[in-house]
Image: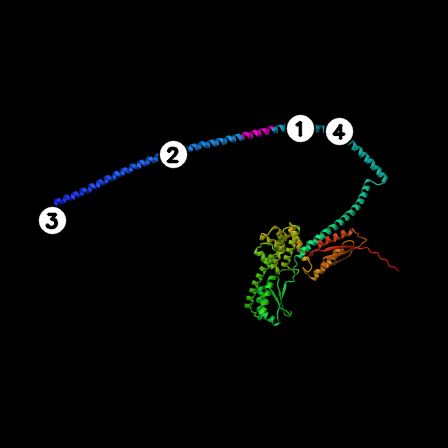
Amino acid sequence: MFNILFNVDVPALITFILLIVVGILMGAYIGYMVRVAHHEKSLKASREEAARIIEDGKKEAEKIKREQVFEAKQEILALRKEFDNDVRERRQVVLTLEEKVTQRENALNNRSQYLDKREESLDLKEQKLDERKEQLDGLYSKVEELVKEQEEKLVFIAGLTKEQAKDLIMAQVKDSISQEIAQFIRDEEEQAKAVVQQKSKELLALAMQKFASETTSERTVSVVEIPNEEMKGRIIGKEGRNIRTLEALTGVDLIIDDTPEAVVLSGFDPVRREIAKRALTILVQDGRIHPGRIEEVVERARLEIDMFIREAGEEAVFKTAIGRVHPDLIKLLGRMSFRTSYGQNALKHSIEVAFLAGKLAAEIGEDEILARRAGLFHDIGKAVDHEIEGSHVEIGVDIVRRYKEPKEVIDAIASHHGDKEPETIIAVLVAAADALSAARPGARSESMDQYMKRLTQLEEISNEVEGVEKSYAIQAGREVRVIVQPEKIDDLGIISVARTIKEKIEETMTYPGTIKVTVIREKRATEVAK
């Protein structure tokens, strides 16, 4: 192998290699030249394309320029046309105003001429009036002289002075007018009473027949029945621990005395008293009575009462259909189911007032729903009046004002007991409904002492009036019948007596509902045959 390699002709090999290198260089140069030619051709084409694009752009720009110039000319023409129209309209307005001014000047000139003529006419009339006044003054002087002469003649004929005659005539006229006034008052009152009585009977009957509720007689005590006397000892517990626990948890006093088979619960808060009553009833029925069980039962009773309060409030709102009510107000309404006033359940009374006020409002065209709402909330302060200082009216006003109730509701609460003058018709209707609900038979109860004092005071007030012979309070003090002395009081005078007694009763007495005053005058003639 080495021999073959070393036997090759070296000069020929070099020549061959050089030829190859020269061929490669020539190919590279030819390729470079071809590439340069191609690049120059492409560059020339690009320059021609650029020139064409520039030319097209110039043409397009020229075209756009011509279009914009045309559009600008058109807009200028339109603006000029609009300006010409505006100038023409303004010129027309100016011409119209000038015509009106001219007409106004002509009218003023005519008015001036008319006023001048009117002034001349008034001057003439004034002169005539002055002359007429002078004539009337002369006639008036003559009339005064004649009147004076006539008065002197009348005084001479009658034998009375002018003042005496005047007093005599005034006395006669006064007596005549007083009789006529009394007769007129009596006729008008009788007519008004006939109409008002009939209408009021219809309204009240309609309102009251729509709603009637039973009354309750709770006070500040509750009674829990027990099966036997042995249960009393179990309630007391060892060393009194059961009764102390129950009293501490409920805030109610348990009175365990000699009353057979009964335990009395005493407390000012009706809700606490009801919780204690339910808890004690459950404990007595269950038989397991010890402090732990008492705590459990009292807590359960408290939850039941809370649920009952909410349900009672919701039921009252649902019955009266007054719309949305704040949950806190619903709870306060429910608490009123345990509150009584003169034996009348406060919640049932409020519901009754709501219905009565609503019916009365419907009859006279007022807002029935708003009247029912005001009637339902009128005693809302009684729910917490034993916990907050102040009257139930003040407390109720603060409560409903806090919950953004309508002004009619606030006014009804503030004025339903006459603490202030009512400002709305709704307040007047609620006050009337409250009086109806409290005054109807069986609605409220009162102690015998208060009852007797009220009847005695009623008769004493009537007997103090001059001309009254005797008086009797009847119908549980809702009417007083007064018998007058016929020789001192005539038929027309009994009207004045009745009004006087009514005013004295209103000024001096406090009473639920209304009191009717009936005055009777009777003339008797008695002879004895022998």
C-alpha separation, residue under disc 4 versus residue under disc 2? 102 Å
Which label is found at residue 6? 3
Which label is found at residue 61? 2
| Residue at x 69% of width, y 54% of height | 202
Q: Residues within 10 Å of mark 2 (few under 14, many from 20)?
A: few
- Residue 303: x percent and y percent? 56, 62
Q: Residue type at mark 3?
A: Phe
Residue identifier under label 4: 131
User: In terms of sequence position, does the residue under pointer 3 or pointer 1 come before the other?
Assistant: 3
Q: Residue type at mark 4?
A: Glu
Q: Nearer the viewer, mark 2 or mark 1?
A: 2
**Span colored in magenta:** 90-102
C-alpha separation, residue under disc 3 versus residue under disc 1? 157 Å
Residue identifier under label 1: 114
Up the image or down, 230 lies above or below 214; here it is below
User: In terms of sequence position, does the residue under pointer 4 or pointer 2 come before the other?
Assistant: 2
The answer to which of 119 and 41 lies nearer the viewer is 41
Whether residue 100 appears in magenta in the rendering, the answer is: yes
Q: Main secondary structure of the magenta part?
A: helix
Q: To which quarter of the image does residue 339 belong?
A: bottom right
Up the image or down, 382 lies above or below 6; here it is below
C-alpha separation, residue under disc 3 versus residue under disc 2? 81 Å
Q: Are marks 2 and 1 in contact (CB under 8 Å)?
A: no
Whether residue 385 appears in magenta in the rendering, the answer is: no
Q: Are marks 3 and 2 in contact (CB under 8 Å)?
A: no
Q: Are marks 1 and 4 in contact (CB under 8 Å)?
A: no
Res 183 visible: yes
Q: To which quarter of the image does residue 71 belong?
A: top left
Q: Secondary structure at mark 1?
A: helix
C-alpha separation, residue under disc 1 versus residue under disc 4? 26 Å
